[in-house]
Image (cartoon, rainbow, N blue to C red):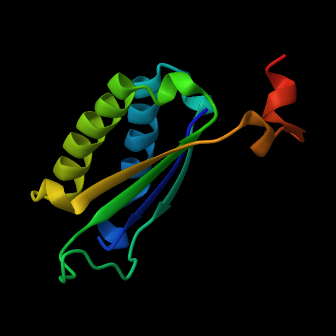
C-alpha cells in the first residue's frame, strides 16, 4: 500500500489524467499489488528549483509501512522504473533532476477504511 507524492514544476497540461493513471499502474506493477492498493498525489505547476535553475524537475516521495517495498533491490527498482517513466513522459532528460525519497513508517501511523493499518494486518 504505497503512498506516492509527486511534485513537479512541469505544467499541468503535460501532467494530465492519463499520466496519473499510467503512473498508478506503474507503481502497482513495481510493488506487485492491485492498483486499488496505490495512492497517488500529483502536484504539477509547482515553483521548484534544483541546482540554481527552474528547469523541469520532479520529486517523488514514496511512503509505506511494508518493509518489502524498501529493500535495497526494491528501492533500485523504484528508482530505475520511475526515472525511465518520468523522463519519457515529462521530457526530463537530465536524470539528476528526478529525485526520489523513501519513507518507511509504522503501520500504526497510517489509517484507512476508518482504522489503523496495523489493525487491518491481523
The residue drawn where x is 87% and y is 27% is 119
Tell me if I can see residue 91 in this picture.
no
Q: Is residue 98 visible?
A: yes
Q: In this rendering, would 15 be left or right of 66?
A: left
Q: Nearer the viewer, residue 117 or 73?
A: 73
- 73 lies above or below 115: above
Image coordinates of residue 107 in percent, x first then y, are 74, 34
Quarter the N terminus occupies? top right
Residue 54: x and y in percent read 22, 82
Q: Is residue 110 left or right of residue 20?
A: right
In the image, is residue 69 above or below residue 116?
Answer: above
Q: Position of residue 16 (x, y in %)?
A: 39, 59
**Residue sticking out furthest to the left:** 93
Q: How far across and how far down the image is residue 58, in percent? A: 31, 62
Q: Quadrant of residue 108?
A: top right
Quarter containing the C terminus: top right
Residue shown at the point (47%, 19%) measured from the top left: 32
- Foreground pick, 113 / 70: 70
Q: Is residue 39 above or below residue 119?
A: below
How many callouts does the rendering have? 0
Looking at the image, which residue is at 20% across and 41% down? 84
Indicate the quadrant where residue 59 lies.
bottom left
113 with respect to 50 (left or right): right
Relative to 111, does residue 107 appear above or below in the rendering? above
Amino acid at each position: 500500500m504505497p503512498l506516492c507524492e509527486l511534485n513537479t514544476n512541469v505544467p499541468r497540461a503535460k501532467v494530465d489524467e492519463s499520466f496519473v493513471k499510467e503512473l498508478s499502474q506503474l507503481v502497482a506493477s513495481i510493488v506487485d499489488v492491485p492498483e486499488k492498493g496505490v495512492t497517488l498525489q500529483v502536484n504539477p505547476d509547482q515553483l521548484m528549483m534544483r541546482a540554481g535553475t527552474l528547469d523541469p524537475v520532479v520529486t517523488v516521495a514514496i511512503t509505506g509501512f511494508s518493509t518489502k517495498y524498501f529493500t535495497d533491490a526494491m528501492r533500485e527498482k523504484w528508482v530505475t522504473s520511475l526515472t525511465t517513466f518520468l523522463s519519457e513522459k515529462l521530457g526530463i532528460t537530465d536524470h539528476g533532476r528526478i529525485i526520489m525519497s523513501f519513507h518507511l513508517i509504522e503501520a500504526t501511523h497510517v489509517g484507512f477504511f476508518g482504522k489503523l493499518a496495523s489493525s487491518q494486518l491481523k
